[in-house]
Image (cartoon, rainbow, N blue to C red):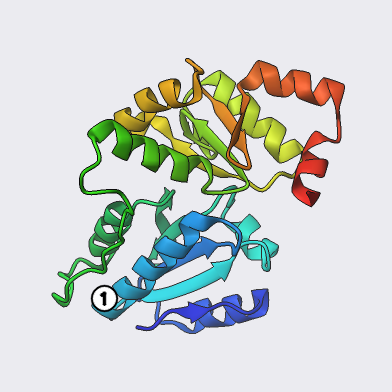
Amino acid sequence: MTVVEITSESHFNELTTSLPATTPITLSFHTSWAAPCAQMNAVFNYLSTQYTDIAFLSVDAEAHPEVSETFDVSAVPFFVFIKNGKVVRELSGADPKELSAAIQELSGQKPAGQPAPTVENGTDKDATPEEDLNARLAKLVNAAPVMLFMKGTPAAPQCGFSRQLVGILRENQVRFGFFDILKDDAVRNGLKTFSDWPTFPQLYVNGELQGGLDIVKEILVDDPNYFKNVQTA
């Protein structure tokens, strides 16, 4: 099935209730400002051509907050997988392979067999592994205007410091991207050198390291409107 872009809450409700109960549904929550969404949208569109038994629905998380709140969407890209009317899995972050595997599991069928789209990493073939990693880290810290590198995900933080920093961002209604450093040792270890900051979580604003939990707390004590100023800059 082709991807259907949701236009309103009523459109979402009408579409999901009109589908046969046995039709699996995949929801893709995205925003226009989060760079990782662009790549994942391309992957999502491609997968919709490979699994014709699944309904693929695309939702702008900011344009339709009532739909986002229904599924507790706190960061994008975010995917929800529904089968027999029940949510069977949720997936956060920009991992094409993980998304593809989740959709194949939801379908229970093999894809049509067309080659998957590739994404150029933009690195120099003659670059050293360290240079390649630094190029990747530079892209990651700029993936969203506010980018959080944390242990776990906003929905399931894996340490108290990460949980507190997510809470601060939510309290201040900050739109943010995130990266779970527990899933990638290269990023986890490389970022310590790249940022010259040995601990996590790490918060970046416009590609610049702000610090960890204590530093962010100090910033807000000095300037309670800090995040408001950042988002209007």
Residues packed near mark 1 inside 10 Å, few (<14), some (14 to 19) or many (20 plus): many
As displayed, is residue 109 above or below residue 4? above
Q: Is residue 26 left or right of residue 118?
A: right
Q: Residue at x 44, y 48 (%)?
A: 93
Residue 22 appears anywhere in the view? no
- Residue 166 occupies quadrant: top right
**Along the line of sight, the residue nearer the viewer: 56 or 196:** 196
Q: Residue at x 24, y 59 (%)?
A: 105
- Residue 108 occupies quadrant: bottom left
The quarter in which the N terminus is drawn is: bottom left
As displayed, is residue 218 above or below residue 147? above
Q: Residue at x 54, y 25 (%)?
A: 201
The x, y position of residue 21, in whole percent, is 40, 76
As displayed, is residue 122 above or below residue 9? above
The x, y position of residue 214, in whole percent, is 67, 16
Q: Residue furthest front?
A: 126
The x, y position of residue 5, in whole percent, is 53, 78
Residue 160 appears anywhere in the view? yes
The x, y position of residue 3, in whole percent, is 43, 79
**Along the line of sight, the residue nearer the viewer: 202 or 92:** 202
Q: Amino acid at mark 1?
A: Tyr
Q: Is residue 126 left or right of residue 187?
A: left
Q: How many marks?
A: 1
Residue that numbered label 1 is attached to: 51
Question: At numbered mark 1, what does the secondary structure look like: helix, strand or loop?
Answer: loop
Q: Residue at x 66, y 74 (%)?
A: 9
As displayed, is residue 67 above or below residue 92? below
